[in-house]
Structure formats: structure tokens, C-alpha cells
Image (tube, grey):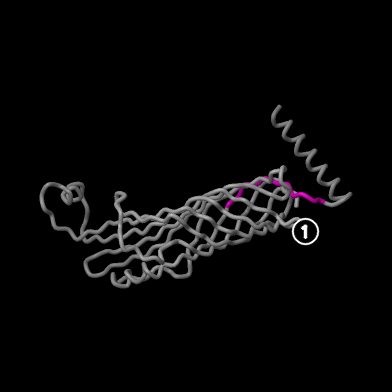
Amino acid sequence: MKKYFLLITLILCFNKINAQEEDIGWVSRFGIAVGFNPAYVFPDLSDINTQIKKMGIDELSNSGLILWGGSGYAYIMMIEDFRIGAIGLSGSTSTSGTVGEFEKEVKYNFGLGGLTFEYTLPFIKNVAVSLGAIVGYGSSSIEIYQSSSDYSWENVWSKVNDGIVMTRDVSDILKQSYLLFTPTINCDIPLTRFFSFRIGGGYNLTFNRSWKVNNNKSISGMPSGLNSNSFFIQTGIYFGFFAY
């Protein structure tokens, strides 16, 4: 019974939209959608690469990294052309190599998530050009590894037992968390009533940043450039119901 009710509701909405388009043109946007959002972000990794050079392995790429995730939104009819949604994205880049007897690796991780608020410009027809922002939470981390031997259950625990054991293995994880405000501009192009493509971008502004190392210990002397403020490019494939 619920399926029939939903089908009838969609048909009525579709007919109403067509009638308004034919008579006076569609004024207020309507839509609800979920989608897949590949994105590309450009964090400043120069301070990390300065240290990686000293390790003797290749630097992390300075050309950015790919983020994967999804988002969704719905227009709220109380405010014309205004939509609210949510988004989550994450990705990583790494470098590794062998220097003498050591295997070394550095990995950089980046992620963000939050609510999205967007106003779709009403004077642009057939596509949805929206100005807005992401308000939420973000994090980044740096993983540093060095190993020189095969591992076993016993020798892993021997590093932390009561005896004094010399080891040159390294396993450190530095984590940063922060509040996030990201102004955005997006263009959604409906290919059908139920499928659209997005291209857009924004700039991440981060606040209340704090770095921790390993088991949540404070760390001093972190470079100010590792603040995760960065441009990003967003794409998307959305499925839902659109009336642009």
C-alpha cells in the first residue's frame, strides 16, 4: 500500500511540475537526491616532504589526492530554492622505499564530513547553480613506519616487556582534528528527471585544530602549514527526483 501511495505522490508532483512549466515556468526548485562524490583536494604537504627527503625515499605528490565518498540533499519547501544535506569524503596518499636494511613508508590521510547548506540561484534555468557551505568536522593524519626484520608474536611483545630491548623499528601516527567551514559553489546538471551530474568546488577553512601522536599524546612543534586549509574540486553522480 505504501508503494502505491509513493507512486501516486510522485506522479502528482510530476504532473504539477509539467503544468507549471507550461503555464508560467518553474520558479522554486524541487528535488531530493543521494549520490557518489569523487573529489580532489590540494593540501600543503611541503613540511612533510621536507622530512621525507631526509628519510631517503620519494616525496608525497604535491599535485593533490583523490577523495571518495557520498552526499545527499533535499530542498526544503519553507524556503524557496534552499536545500540541506550531508556529505562525507576521505582519501590518502603514500610513499615507500627501501633504504639500506630498512623498509620505510609515510602515509597521509585526509577526511571531512558535515552538513551542507546551499541556495540555488533562481534566475538560472535548466541547471542548478548553488552557493553554500559545508559545516562540520575534519581530520588528517601522518603515518610513519620503519622496519628492518621479520615479525613474530614474541619479538613484537619483547619491545615493551620489562627488559631493555634495543629496536630500530618505528611506528608513529600523528593525528589532527578540527572544525570545518567550507564555502562551496556547485553546478548540478539534470540529465533526466531522476539522474544528474555535479561539478563544483570549495575551500576548506579549519578551526580549533589540535595534533596528537600515537595513543592521544600531545605533540609540540608541529609546522603551522599543516593546517588542512585547502581548495578542493568536487564531482558527483546523483540519483533522485529533480525539477530545475
Image check: 106 left or right of 208? left
Residue at the outermost top position: 1
Image check: 202 left or right of 95? right
Main SS, magenta residues: strand
At horizontal 41% and vertical 57% (from top left) the residue drawn is: 109
Residue 161 x, y percent position in the rendering = 15, 47
Task: Indicate whether 222 appears above or below 137.
Answer: below
Residue 116 x, y percent position in the rendering = 59, 50
Looking at the figure, which quarter contains the N terminus?
top right
> Which one is nearer the viewer's eye here, 64 or 46?
46
Q: Does the stretch in magenta take in 35?
A: yes
Residue type at mark 1 is Phe
Residue stretch in magenta? 26-36
Q: Does the stretch in magenta take in 170?
A: no
> Which one is nearer the viewer's eye here, 69 or 120?
120
Task: Indicate whether 50 appears above or below 217.
Answer: below
Residue 115 x, y percent position in the rendering = 56, 48
Residue 152 x, y percent position in the rendering = 20, 50
The number of callouts visible is 1
**Circle 1 sits on which residue?**
123
At horizontal 86% and vertical 45% (from top left) the residue drawn is: 19
